[in-house]
Amino acid sequence: MCGRDEWPPQDEYRPESLEVEGFVHCSDLGTVHLPANQLFSGRTDLVLLVIDPARLDAPVRWERPVVGPPDGPWFPHVYGPINPGAVIDVIDFPPGPDGVFTLPAVLANP
């Protein structure tokens, strides 16, 4: 996920985490609400980038979260920039009226 003004990039998507931590934080459909609520509370400009891992130019590794319980869910980390050709859809991701993020209906009921 990223801010609406960050997508599409001029070339490749390179969030700050890539420079600082060496990878891009990603989520699956079952966990996308966790980082959204923890890291992006109050934001109303988010979009979800739906990524086809087979189209990525960089490797993906499923790993324990950087923050949170060690027995919590694992997350996909992309070890390189996100090439635009790997993004197969971009979906608005506003919080609900209560400010809480949940999976958009379009993804929950494909």
Image: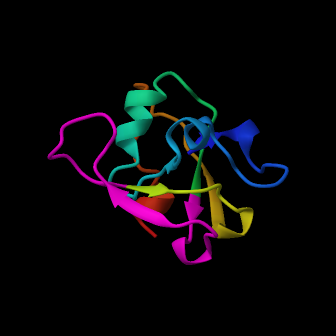
Q: Is residue 53 above or below residue 28?
A: below
Q: Residue at x 18, y 42 (%)?
A: 70
State the predominant SS element of the stretch in magenta. loop
Q: Residue at x 34, y 50 (%)?
A: 31
Residue 61 part of the magenta-drawn span: yes
Residue found at the very far right of the displayed protein: 10
Give the left or right position of residue 49, taking residue 40 as reference. right
Residue found at the very far bottom of the displayed protein: 54
Q: Is residue 58 above or below residue 20?
A: below
Picture quarter containing residue 108? bottom left
Q: Nearer the viewer, residue 22 or 72?
A: 22
Q: Position of residue 83 (x, y in %)?
A: 70, 62
Question: Could one spot residue 66 in this view of the protein?
Answer: yes
Residue 68 part of the magenta-drawn span: yes
Picture quarter containing residue 17? top right
Residue found at the very far top of the displayed protein: 42
Q: Residue at x 47, y 52 (%)?
A: 26
Give the left or right position of residue 76, taking residue 54 as reference. left
| Quadrant holding the N terminus | top right
Q: Position of residue 42 (x, y in %)?
A: 50, 21
Question: Could one spot residue 100 in this view of the protein?
Answer: no
Q: Which residues are magenta?
A: 50-75
Q: Position of residue 23 (x, y in %)?
A: 52, 49
Q: Nearer the viewer, residue 17 or 84?
A: 17
Q: Position of residue 88 (x, y in %)?
A: 64, 68
